[in-house]
Image (cartoon, grey):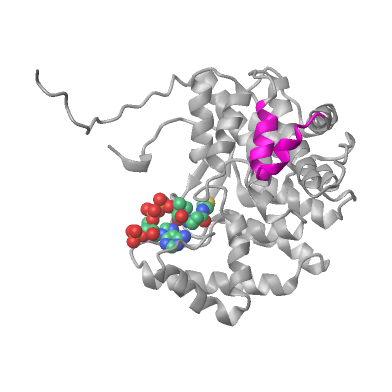
Amino acid sequence: MNNGLEDVIAAETQLSDVDGEAGRLIIRGVSLDRLVSASTYESVAALLLDGLTERHLDAVELRKRLGEMRVGLFAHVTALDLELLALPPVDAMRALIARLPDGEDFEAALRLLAAPAVFLPAILRMKTGNEPVAPDACLSQATDILRMLTGQLPSAEQTAALDVYLVTISDHGLNASTFASRVIASTRAGLTSSVVAAISALKGPLHGGAPGPVLDMFDAIGTSDNARDWLGRALDRGERLMGFGHRIYRVRDPRADALKQALRPLVLAAQIDRQRIELAEAVEHAAVAILKERKPDRPLDVNVEFYTALLLDALGFPRESFTGVFAIGRTVGWIAHAREQALEGRLIRPRSVYIGPLPQAA
Ligand code: COA
């Protein structure tokens, strides 16, 4: 028995490799640093899906088809059941996605890539009493998400920052939500079912639910000189520091660096609160030091969620929506893994060891 399936290999994949010792992420043969410097959401989506459905589109064609799909999906927003708006954004988004037809073909994949990008901004606007903004088929997915969120065209720096984020989190080995997606795909249930299951796994605070609490932590710490004391007290209470630690990485999560760098243009263009960045750096520094003292046997460093919190906050996403934005970016990884599993894998059916009582002899 291996509690948490740590180190268990459950799939062969051509999609991504996470090297926890070297702190390296490779997506389809391209290292993360190269990918973020040269890619948009559409190009990484084309890369990940290549060969996994009956059609292959390059980034330019994919951008066009995604735009059309976003426009088509807006009807689901206008027909939205208002009771959904009382739910947390990721739950409301999951409910709307669950209404999409299941399928395993290119159209089903495309629909699922476009759906969260349309649904989340609309839900966020409607939750605050604003009208949803209809998609614009001519824009890139990143530009249109920000426009549908705020009602205004984003700056070039903001679009670039969101593209870096979406590329950075597009795929990441056999994490909990991706495994959930593959389990569902192994039963041949269809891509919508895979994505709904994956969102459900993602929303937990040990997986994709951490960046909202990271911002709460910044607020509670308040000033840089308070960081060490505050973090020490949190650890004294037995709490985990959000945005630190990882099941695979034993060094710094390379995605944290990619996102930290993506913040720079926003700083230079004065589109992010500089004091917030300084506070984050002080918190990171203090947390890494104190974790080293308290857990000397377990290397714990910053993970992707830490700088995600700063980046998404700067782009205008409310903190309760961060998991939903993560889902927008990760859906392509979930779909690619689901297709790979359906094409090459078997039904996933592990075994358990029974440790309960045996029936009494008569
Ligand atoms: N803060 C404080 N201690 C932490 C920690 C954190 N963020 N992450 C792990 N630890 C400690 C655990 O308490 C445990 O200590 P113990 O052996 O004294 O009990 C030890 O490190 C090993 O933890 P374990 O639960 O085995 O690690 P894991 O691989 O199961 O956990 C995470 C990985 C990501 C769930 C964990 O690091 C965590 O909870 N991080 C905070 C949430 C977060 O940022 N999630 C986003 C992940 S991308």
Is residue 81 on the magenta stretch? Answer: yes
Q: Nearer the viewer, residue 63 or 208?
A: 208
Could you tell me residue 258's position as x and y percent? 64, 56
Q: Quadrant of ligand 1?
A: bottom left
Could you tell me residue 260's position as x and y percent? 65, 62
Q: Quadrant of residue 217?
A: bottom right
Q: Nearer the viewer, residue 128 or 32?
A: 128
Quarter of the rendering occupied by the N terminus: top left
Q: Nearer the viewer, residue 331 or 60?
A: 331
Is residue 46 visible to the viewer in this orientation of the structure?
Answer: no
Quarter of the rendering occupied by the C terminus: top left
Residue drawn at x 44%, y 63% as measured from the top left: 239
Count the labels in the image.
0
Is residue 321 visible to the viewer in this orientation of the structure?
Answer: yes
Q: Quadrant of residue 272?
A: bottom right
Q: In the image, which residues are magenta?
A: 79-98
Could you tell me residue 303's position as x and y percent? 54, 57
**265 relative to 168, above or below:** below
Could you tell me residue 184's position as x and y percent? 51, 25
Q: Quadrant of residue 292?
A: bottom left
Principal SS element in the magenta part?
helix
**280 relative to 184, above or below:** below
Q: Residue furthest left?
A: 362
Is residue 121 on the magenta stretch? Answer: no
